Amino acid sequence: MSNEKTILVETFGSAPVIRIIDFLIDNPLSDYSKEEMIKGIGISKVTFYKYFPLLEESGIVRETRKIGKSKMYKLNEKNDVVKKLKELVWALGMKAMQRSVEGIEIKIVGKTK
């Protein structure tokens, strides 16, 4: 995991549940095994296995398929909590972009007559 913080982690901290959700929000096109998520997030197996069942039980993540013995997971896009989380991430991003734009001085350069 890079040292650069995402808007979700920057806003709510780097608690394991936030980091797991953040990883899956940032990587919506693929599904991941638990091992892939652990490596991608950069947390210990013990920590991951402590919190991941909470996300499964709440329906935030869902199993998509099995590859051999590995189960693959992704965010449950139909879950109301996931929908709200994605809206929140979008709103936080828009607010950050607005603050960034407000801090930029725009100079218009052109011909004078």
Image (cartoon, helix red, strand yellow):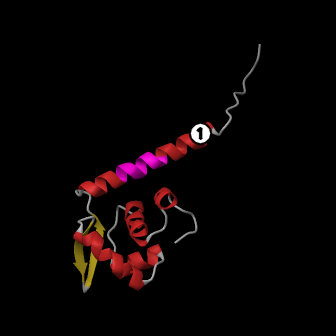
Residue identified by numbered label 1: 101
Q: Position of residue 16 (x, y in %)?
A: 42, 72
In screen coordinates, is 62 left or right of 106?
left
Q: Is residue 75 above or below residue 66?
A: above
Q: Residues within 10 Å of mark 1 (few under 14, many from 20)?
A: few
Which of 52/71 is in front?
52
Which residue is at a point 34% across and 81% down the rendered structure image?
49
Q: Residue at x 23, y 65 (%)?
A: 59
Is 59 situated left or right of 8 in this image? left
Q: Is residue 5 above or below residue 88?
A: below
Q: Main secondary structure of the magenta part?
A: helix
- Which quarter of the rendered picture does the C terminus lie within? top right
- Furthest residue toward right: 113
Q: Which residues are magenta?
A: 86-93
Could you say which quadrant of the image residue 30 lies in?
bottom left
**Which amino acid type is shown beneath numbered disc 1?**
Val
User: Would residue 83 be found to the left or right of residue 94 on screen?
Assistant: left
- Image height check: is 22 above or below 33? above
* Residue lying farthest to the top in this orientation: 113
Q: Nearer the viewer, residue 92 or 109?
A: 92
The residue lying at 45 percent from left, 79 percent from top is 39
From what the image shows, is residue 38 above or below residue 6? below
Q: Is 39 within the magenta?
A: no
